[in-house]
Structure formats: C-alpha cells, structure tokens
Image: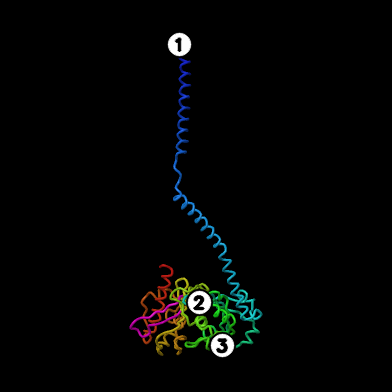
Amino acid sequence: MSEELKDKVNKEVTTSQNEASKDTSKENKKQKKVKKAKTKKPLSNFILFPIVLGSVCLISAGAIAGINYLTEPIIARNAEKKYLKSCYKLLGNENIDKTQGTDGLSKADVPTSASYILQAYKVFVTSEFASAHSEYSDFYYYVLQTPSGYKGSVTLACIIAGTYGEDGVLYDMMAIDTTSEDALGAGQLQNVTVKPGYTGEDGDNLLDSGYITSGATAKVTFNAVDTAIKQAIQVFEGKIIPTIGYQKTEDGYEIYYNEHSIENMTYSSFTGYVYIKDEKVYNVEILSSTNTIGAKDNAWLNGGSYSYYEDMLDFTSFSNKYVNATDGVSFDVFSSDPVYVAGATQATEGYVEFIRSTIELYNEHHNK
C-alpha cells in the first residue's frame, strides 16, 4: 500500500473516532440533564400555595377594579335618577318646567362645611305653580344624609322654598332610604306629612313645631332629621359660609371666599367674596364687617353715598375713584404701598388689606 493511501485511510479512521467521541459526549450530557431533572427537588407546598393564592388574589382584584370602574358611573347615574324622581314627586311632575335647566333642575353649589347635604338643585316651576304659590320666590331641592338617629342615618329629599339667599322654609320632604334606621323611626318617617312653613330657627324643633303629623314616638330619628333640615334651610338662606379659599370659576372669574382681620385697627375685619381674572380684581362682595363705617369713609369709598356697609363697599365705585380703573384692578396696585385719602385712611386700608389677603389665597391656589 502506498504511503499516500495509508495517510488517507488513517485520516478517515481518526475522523470517525472523533465524531464517535462527540456523539458519546453529547449522549452523556443529555443523560446527565435527564438525571438532574429527575432528581430536582419540587417546590414545597408552603412556598407554592402562597404563590398560587397571591396570583389568584391579584387577578381577582384587577377584575373587581375593572368592574367597579365600569359600573360606578352607572350606579351614580341611577342614584341621581332616583333622587330626581323624589323631587318630581314632592312638587308634582306637572308643576316642574322641564324646558329649563336639565329636566327642570339646575345643580347648585354646596358649601364644603354643609356635611349633611349630598346634592342641591334649583327647581324651575311652571308659571301656574309660581302664581299659585306667590309667597315663595324660589324653590330648591336638597338630598340630605342625616346624622345617626336611633340606629343609623337616613337619606331624605326635601324642598326648601322662599327667597333664595334671604329666608326659607321647609315646603315638603320624604324619605328616600331608611334601611339603616330602626323600624319604628323608618316607619314613621315614611308616613310623615308636612305642612309648609317650618323655619328651623334656633331653639325650634321639627317634631314639636306642628308642621309635621308623625314622629311622636320616634324622637331620636326625628331629631336627626331636624338637624339635617336646619342645615338645608341655612344653606338656602346663605348662612353657612364656605371654607376660606378658592370656591369656583364662574363666567371666567375665579371666586374666592375670605375672612381677614388686622389687630389694633378700627376697620380691620371683613368677610366676603373676591372675583379674580387674569391677575386682576374685578369685584368684591363684602358680607360683613365688625365696625360701622363713618360718614367720611362712606364719602371716600362710595363717592358720597351714605348707606350701610353692604352697599357702601362697592368695588366698582372704589376702583374708579382709587385707581381710575374700569376693567379690573391689577394685583400690582394692591401689592404697592398706596397713599390713603385723609379722613378715610383706616376704612380704605382695611378694604385694601382684605383684597391683598385674598390675592395671597389666589397665589396659594396657583402655587405661586
């Protein structure tokens, strides 16, 4: 055999041996993996069960959250429909002018401190109904959640009638939900009839007023009802003041409520609303002041009109005379050190300080 042929044969033999060796190595590795897989220790049930349970809880929570997200608006709408039906029932469906507002109602603001009022609406009544009840200028509908009675709270619907912002009386009411209260209180409340006229004055009590025909043996329940009804009347009359700060935006104006006083100053305490837009003050409604304004102060602040402080502290007159401005007064005017007119220094200073303090509330609201 030639040398060349011998080399070729040896080379093929070597190659075959190498390939066989590789196959054996692969087979060994495969067998080791199988063996390792067979001998691998399974997870303990103490570890496995919490993992499975936790996964189920997460999936369930996500599903519940999704269902709540989808159903919550529907529940809210159904509750509101139920509330509005109570309003129509109290006043009579035919007596509500559904061409105005939304089906005859317009949602009203509720002061943050009015804790028993869930919703409030101005009710538009027909001209015929208004003529037949001319002693009342306005009708408002309130949904109330009473404080706890004998056992629990009650959801009420009530109509307050009168002149909005001035005086009001309980016109009618009905129970919407009494499931949390005891059977005696719930039963008497569901059967109550109301005669219009209860004013809710301090010291008065609905149960003893003569304006209802039920409740004599459910005093605890009706005391809770009385508390909520009185709050509705006070809100109607404007006697419950909102918390200090931003209240709402209306017609482009941000409206702020403020109470401000300065120590050791005669005309130092003012409460009221300030209307702001584009960092200008456009209107100030003074609700109260601790001092009577003198004649000279009147002349300065209101161009010589001698009247009570509610009329005297007119911002339009003040801004025209003080800064000759007819389209709002810039914040810069109040942040400067104005020169007050002799004879009206303290009245003007107190007024300006009240506005300055409200501008600070504006800055806080806008994080400035």
Q: Nearer the observer, disc 2 or disc 3? A: 2
| Label 1 crowd bin: few (<14), some (14–19), many (20+), radius 10 Å | few
Q: Do the residues labelled 2 and 3 touch (CB within 8 Å)?
A: no
x then y, percent, for residue 278: 47, 71
Q: Which amino acid does label 3 sit on?
A: Tyr
Q: Which residue lies furthest to the top in this view?
A: 1
| The C terminus, quarter of image | bottom left
Q: What element carries label 2?
A: loop
Q: Mark 1 points at which residue?
A: 3
Reading the chain from its start, which is encountered first: label 2 or label 3?
Answer: 2
Q: What element carries label 1?
A: helix
Reading the chain from its start, which is encountered first: label 1 or label 2?
Answer: 1
Q: What residue type is labelled 1?
A: Glu
In magenta stretch: residue 243: no
Q: Nearer the observer, disc 1 or disc 2? A: 2
x then y, percent, for residue 254: 48, 73
Q: Is mark 3 on a helix, strand or loop?
A: loop
Range of magenta residues: 256-272
Q: Mark 2 points at which residue?
A: 151
Q: In this view, does 268 lie to the left or right of 83?
A: left
Q: Is residue 271 or residue 78 the one in the foreground?
A: 78
Instruction: Specify whether residue 277 is in view.
Output: yes
In magenta stretch: residue 262: yes
Q: Name the residue under label 3.
A: 211
Instruction: Specify whether residue 141 is in view.
Output: no
Q: How far apart are marks 2 and 3 (CA)?
A: 24 Å
Q: Which residue lies furthest to the left in this view?
A: 264
